[in-house]
Amino acid sequence: MRRVTSQSLGELAPGFAATRRGFNTYAALILAIGIFALGLGLASWNVQIGTSLIVLGGITFAGASVIAIAGEVETYRGLKR
């Protein structure tokens, strides 16, 4: 994975995903999607647990998205042009 995220993608320079913090942030985004989906599945069986997981997944996704966007902007601004 490091090899893919640290290579230039056309006009886009290697970015935030190539850093340890970036990798962990994007992994958290994927995990949040999984928690949200699990909550959707469990909501029909147990409404409280399902709703809690949906909310947890949504909050985690929102927080990780903010961190990812800030990291990408920081990385982009740090590029030598």
Image (spheres, rainbow, N blue to C red):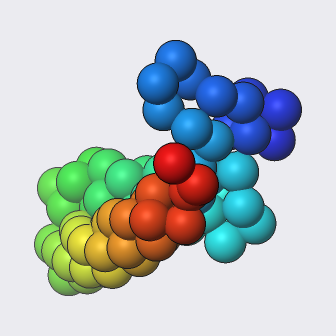
Tally the numbered discs. 0
Q: Position of residue 55 (x, y in %)?
A: 21, 77
Place residue 60 in its image quadrant: bottom left
Q: Is residue 15 visible?
A: yes
Query: Which one is in front, 37 or 13?
Result: 13
Q: Position of residue 79 (x, y in %)?
A: 56, 56
Place residue 46 in its image quadrant: bottom left
Q: Position of residue 61 (x, y in %)?
A: 32, 67
In this rendering, the answer to whether 54 lies above or below 13 is: below
Q: Is residue 35 visible?
A: no
Residue at 56 percent of width and 23 percent of height: 9
Residue farthest front in this picture:
81
Residue 59 left/right relative to 4: left
Q: What is the quadrant of the N terminus in the image?
A: top right
Place residue 42 in its image quadrant: bottom left
Residue at 61 percent of width and 63 percent of height: 22
Residue at 58 percent of width and 54 percent of height: 80
Query: Which one is in front, 37 or 5?
Result: 5
Residue at 52 percent of width and 18 percent of height: 10
Residue 13 left/right relative to 44: right
Residue farthest top in this picture:
10
